[in-house]
Amino acid sequence: MNNVTIPEFKLAKALSSRSTFLVVIESAFVLLINLFALVGNALLCLAIRKNVRLRRNTTNLFIVSLACSDVLMALLCMPLSVGVFIRGQWIYGQLLCQLQGFAFFVLAFVSLETMALVAVNRYLNVTKPALYQRLFTHKRSCNMIVTLWLLCLFYVGIFTILKWPVFVFNPGKAICHIKIRRGPYKTAWNFITLFVFALVPMVTLFVCYWRVFVSVRRHNVQTLRWLRGSEACMQKVVIQWKISR
């Protein structure tokens, strides 16, 4: 079956033998997601671009980076998947399969790492404002974004060059997914991807936003105690004033 496993063969058969009603519903749904992702993120970038105040906020630089990755995903990857849902198979040839797979993983990794950077940005802004001002300057934030994009491009590019063709159409996901045979390349890909591009971002997101939540709650409790203390003091002052009268 040309290196196609039995589960993949069954998925390919199920994809190509769908009813006309299911083809229309699934294709329309994926197309709507594609359009919303493209238009919504493009408008977000435009709004930040037009507003000087928004551009000065370094957090919005990371938001723009995240939006750009989503726009590119909507332009480079999702339209091909829409065609797959319409035709029921991959019809674009091997070269476009490699390009879609490469773009998909680069953009997905950029999104995950950018969300982690946004979490760190928010955490430092809330809990350590002095460090935030030193670390997240406009220039350093831009350097972080460029470095992140280059890192993801380099990582996926290395495996694409060394194991060409490395992406194979997966009918269960309707995209060209990476497929590395057994060996050191597969071990390296699985370990680095799991640790650097999955585990680290998830842990960073959880820890940073949890610390932000704890910090905000602690601040609210202290503020409430101060207000109650101030209210009690005011009541005492009022009582003493009335007695003195």
Image (cartoon, rainbow, N blue to C red):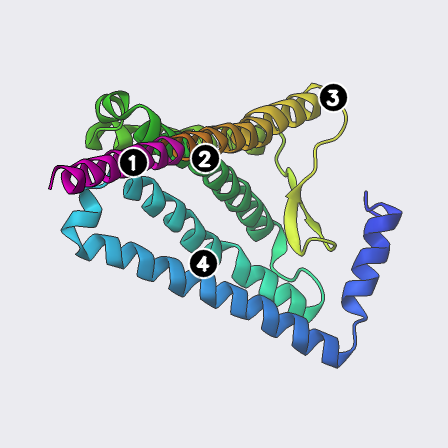
Is residue 241 visible in the rendered structure shown here? yes
Q: Point out the tag, 2 or 4, that comes first from the N-terminus.
A: 4
Q: Residues within 10 Å of mark 4 (few under 14, many from 20)?
A: some
In the orientation shown, which residue stands out farthest toward the bottom? 21
Residue matched to label 4:
75
Camera-near label (1 vs 3) is 1
Q: Label 1, label 3: how many angstroms apart (C-alpha)? A: 72 Å
Residue 11 at x, y = what percent?
A: 81, 57
Residue drawn 60% across the image and 70% down it: 29
Name the disc covering residue 232, or none: 1
Residue 8 lies left or right of residue 39; in this view the side is right
Secondary element at tag 3: loop
Q: Point out the tag, 1 or 4, that comes first from the N-terminus.
A: 4
Secondary element at tag 2: helix
Q: Residues within 10 Å of mark 3 (few under 14, many from 20)?
A: few
User: Magenta region: which residues?
Assistant: 220-245
Residue matched to label 3:
183
In magenta segment, residue 65: no
Q: Label 3, label 2: how many angstroms apart (C-alpha)? A: 44 Å
The answer to whether residue 4 is above or below residue 236 is below
Residue 96 lies left or right of residue 38; in this view the side is right
